[in-house]
């Protein structure tokens, strides 16, 4: 039994109502703060008596349209009868966020290793007296150029497999090693000009 | 140069330019090889539950561009490979549906209804042969409609559409996709508007990149390929991983099938299924030509129509070959017709068309749209040559599919054994690597992941990712058309109502939204 001002449909779709409020506020902020501060031409520009559309036109129209659509969506969700609520299907619950948190952690560790492991190994060797130069100078040299990608890639694949299977398995580790080696070979062997992460221009 | 000259040049370009080797004196061009490899790869991924044609196209595109570069002569080999994947994956999708009751692609879901019962009867070979025959027939019919229809539609569009009408047509397409895809019109519209808005970040004509918040990384906007692959592919990967994590791997036991009885496809079988193929191919082609409506609906409608006209036994759902034919012909017929709006209007209607457009945008030298089919006296329209080259590649892919496709398809039953939870993380790394290799900076990787999470949330909350992506791709075209329309109408703020055609497009856009908003519940 539901009571109060909110319809059962809204209770079934709290995210839809929340998003309607979020996008309404975000579009107002965009219209009155972001667009005026971050676009230098107006909605309409006049230059030597020639009237043209300015850079602010398209984002302004979109922000107004997002505001209107969000308000309509929110109102309909709150006030429409609930019997036909299949159109506001939501599939996001606490479990989704538990999964997402695990996924984000694993992907982040993988990417951090991918970007920083190579330079860290080079720094370590230099600190121990190896004097091999900076990573920047070694990023086209084996094995330094592949350290980050191979280890980071392995952690990314193996980590996700382990999250999904809820266990660490030798089989999963083996699949991850094979996969990352095959992908590395796919890019490294046939192409001299392709750069694996993190060895690009920036 | 006339139309026939362009058609001939298109064919010659596909078969003779850039020969890699020759067989019995016949040169085998790079495009031909790429179509073949794409088709095999397509069948392979179609038969692998968890990856379908779109994922394969997404992973392949950056790699292909890395291999072939950005010059115009890369266009046909790259498009050939993508077309091969598109065609192969529709055929391959039927394999796990028939053999293991697990659809390889969502549009093969209806194939399980009659395909799996036939397998249980000991006739998997027959079911696969019917699926192959129907799928390739539907695809071929659809391609014929594309090849004959797209140029004429383009000529009509070119004659009647000026800038105001083009802007109105893009608005109509977006309204249609937003309203039709997904179960809530308002969410569809919001997704499309968000796509448009995000595409306007960091772009514009002024020296100051708009809405970039002072970030150098955003000065050129979000990389298109990051946005598209993130929302379409990574979003799906994240959601599928979560689904599997929740299920904690439902143990799917693979039952060994004992092959017995008639497993051949006879002339009498073909006679039985031909009417079903004809009807379903027509349904699939019509649906494919409309933006936003995918092959899953085509398969459902094809199957439902087939069931209505089917008499005799076995009934639909009990192993009727007509059921397999009705589904496979319908979902495969979507593939060719899907390219009608992209080639004649420059408007992608679905995911495969998005990747074809993405390839042409990345490589350059070919901008899909009505100007592709413009005949210029005494000159070669290179874009038209490429268009007919693409058609030739499609016909060639169909030829390969007719001859070799069935054999490869029947080998692919083994793909079901690959566990999806092991495959998807590999797809993730491959996608991120492909993005990095093309963009050569980690910012593009982070943006792709960001859009991936956006795609995940959109899927979980039932927002249309297709509407978002199509809007993102068309955003700059829309703005450019609006700027031009404003200029040519002498700064008329009502330029969208400047001609009867644009008024009609705008009115239909509004009517489409109202109609689907009012009838949503009935449609659901």
Image: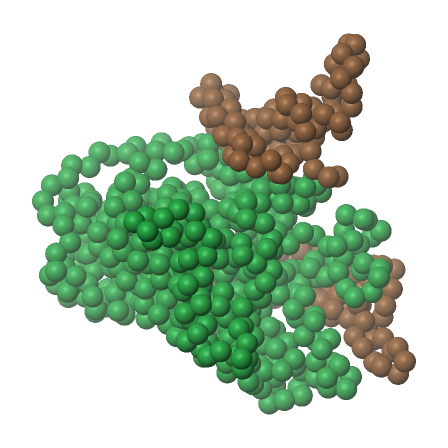
Chain colours: A brown, B green
Quadrant of residue B434 in the image? Answer: top right
Question: What is the residue that sits farthest to the bottom in this orientation?
Answer: B500
For residue B35, side relative to residue B431 (left or right): left
Is B185 rendered above or below residue B127?
Answer: below
Q: Work out which residue is located at the far top of the displayed protein and give it.
A: A128
Residue A125 point in image, percent of width and height:
74, 14
A135 lies above or below B522 = above
Residue at image location 19% in from the left, 56% down from the top: B321
- In the foreground, B191 or B450: B450
| Residue B402 locus on image (x, y percent) | 27, 56
Q: Residue at x 47, y 46 (%)?
A: B56
Give the quarter of the figure containing the C terminus of chain A: top right
User: Exactly how many numbered labels are in the figure?
Assistant: 0
Q: Residue placed at 65% from the left, 69% from the top?
A: B477
Seen as rendered, the residue at the extreme right is A48
Query: B514 left or right of B116?
Result: right
Q: Quadrant of residue B450?
A: top right
Q: Is residue A52 visible?
A: yes
Image position, residue B29 (x, y; %): 42, 52
* Nearer-the-camera pick, A81 or B496: B496
Give me the residue at 41% from left, 69% from top.
B8
Residue A2 sits above or below residue A118 on the image = below
Position of B177 with respect to A124 (left or right) is left
Q: Is residue A76 above or below residue B162?
A: above
Residue B398 in picture, x, y percent from top left: 33, 58
Which sits in the foreground, B457 or B474?
Answer: B474
Can residue B98 be seen in this snapshot?
no
């Amino acid at each position: 039994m539901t009571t109060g001002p909110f319809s059962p449909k809204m209770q079934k779709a709290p995210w839809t109502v929340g998003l309607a409020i979020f996008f309404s506020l975000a579009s107002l902020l965009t219209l009155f703060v972001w667009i005026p501060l971050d676009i230098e031409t107006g909605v309409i520009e006049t230059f030597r008596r020639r009237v043209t559309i300015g850079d602010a036109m398209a984002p302004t129209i979109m922000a107004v349209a997002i505001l209107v659509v969000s308000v309509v969506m929110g109102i309909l969700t709150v006030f429409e009868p609930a019997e036909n609520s299949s159109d506001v299907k939501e599939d996001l619950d606490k479990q989704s966020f538990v999964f997402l948190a695990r996924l984000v952690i694993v992907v982040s560790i993988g990417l951090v290793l991918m970007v920083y492991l190579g330079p860290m190994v080079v720094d370590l060797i230099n600190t121990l007296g190896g004097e091999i130069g900076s990573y920047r100078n070694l990023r086209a040299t084996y094995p330094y150029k592949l350290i980050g990608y191979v280890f980071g890639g392995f952690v990314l694949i193996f980590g996700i497999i382990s999250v999904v299977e809820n266990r660490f398995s030798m089989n999963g580790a083996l699949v991850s090693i094979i996969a990352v080696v095959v992908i590395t070979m796919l890019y490294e062997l046939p192409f001299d000009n392709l750069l694996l992460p993190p060895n690009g221009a920036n | 140069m006339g139309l026939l000259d362009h058609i001939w040049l298109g064919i010659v370009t596909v078969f003779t330019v850039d020969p890699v080797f020759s067989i019995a004196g016949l040169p085998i061009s790079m495009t031909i090889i790429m179509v073949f490899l794409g088709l095999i790869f397509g069948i392979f991924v179609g038969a692998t539950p968890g990856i379908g044609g779109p994922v394969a196209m997404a992973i392949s595109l950056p790699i292909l561009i890395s291999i072939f570069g950005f010059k115009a002569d890369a266009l046909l080999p790259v498009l050939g490979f993508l077309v091969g994947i598109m065609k192969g994956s529709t055929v391959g999708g039927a394999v796990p549906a028939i053999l293991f009751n697990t659809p390889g692609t969502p549009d093969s879901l209806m194939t399980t209804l009659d395909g799996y019962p036939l397998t249980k009867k000991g006739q998997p070979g027959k079911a696969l042969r019917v699926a192959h025959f129907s799928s390739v027939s539907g695809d071929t019919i659809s391609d014929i409609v594309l090849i004959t229809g797209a140029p004429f539609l383009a000529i009509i569009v070119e004659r009647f559409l000026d800038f105001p009408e083009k802007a109105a047509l893009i608005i109509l397409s977006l309204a249609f996709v937003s309203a039709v895809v997904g179960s809530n019109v308002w969410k569809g519209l919001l997704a499309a508007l968000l796509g448009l808005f995000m595409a306007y970040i960091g772009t514009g004509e002024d020296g100051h990149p708009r809405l970039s918040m002072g970030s150098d990384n955003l000065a050129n906007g979000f990389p298109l390929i990051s946005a598209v692959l993130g929302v379409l592919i990574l979003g799906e990967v994240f959601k599928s991983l979560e689904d599997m994590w929740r299920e904690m791997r439902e143990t799917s036991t693979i039952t060994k099938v004992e092959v017995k009885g008639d497993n051949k496809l006879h002339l009498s079988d073909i006679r039985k299924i031909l009417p079903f193929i004809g009807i379903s191919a027509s349904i699939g082609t019509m649906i494919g030509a409309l933006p936003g409506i995918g092959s899953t609906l085509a398969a459902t409608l094809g199957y439902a129509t087939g069931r209505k006209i089917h008499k005799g036994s076995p009934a639909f759902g009990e192993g009727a070959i007509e059921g397999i034919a009705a589904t496979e012909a319908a979902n495969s017929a979507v593939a060719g017709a899907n390219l009608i709006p992209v080639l004649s209007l420059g408007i992608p209607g679905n995911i495969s068309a998005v990747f074809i457009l993405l390839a042409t945008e990345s490589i350059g030298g070919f901008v899909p749209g009505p100007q592709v089919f413009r005949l210029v006296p005494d000159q070669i329209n290179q874009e038209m040559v490429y268009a007919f080259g693409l058609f030739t590649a499609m016909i060639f892919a169909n030829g390969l599919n007719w001859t070799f496709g069935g054999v490869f398809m029947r080998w692919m039953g083994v793909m079901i054994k690959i566990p999806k939870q092991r495959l998807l993380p590999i797809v993730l790394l491959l996608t991120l690597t492909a993005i990095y290799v093309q963009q050569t900076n980690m910012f593009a990787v982070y943006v792709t992941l960001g859009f991936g999470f956006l795609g995940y949330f959109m899927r979980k909350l039932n927002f249309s990712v297709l509407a978002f992506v199509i809007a993102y791709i068309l955003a700059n075209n829309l703005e450019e058309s609006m700027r031009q329309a404003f200029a040519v109408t002498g700064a008329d703020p009502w330029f969208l109502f400047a001609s009867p055609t644009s008024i009609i497009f705008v009115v239909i856009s509004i009517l489409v939204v109202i109609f689907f908003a009012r009838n949503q519940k009935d449609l659901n």
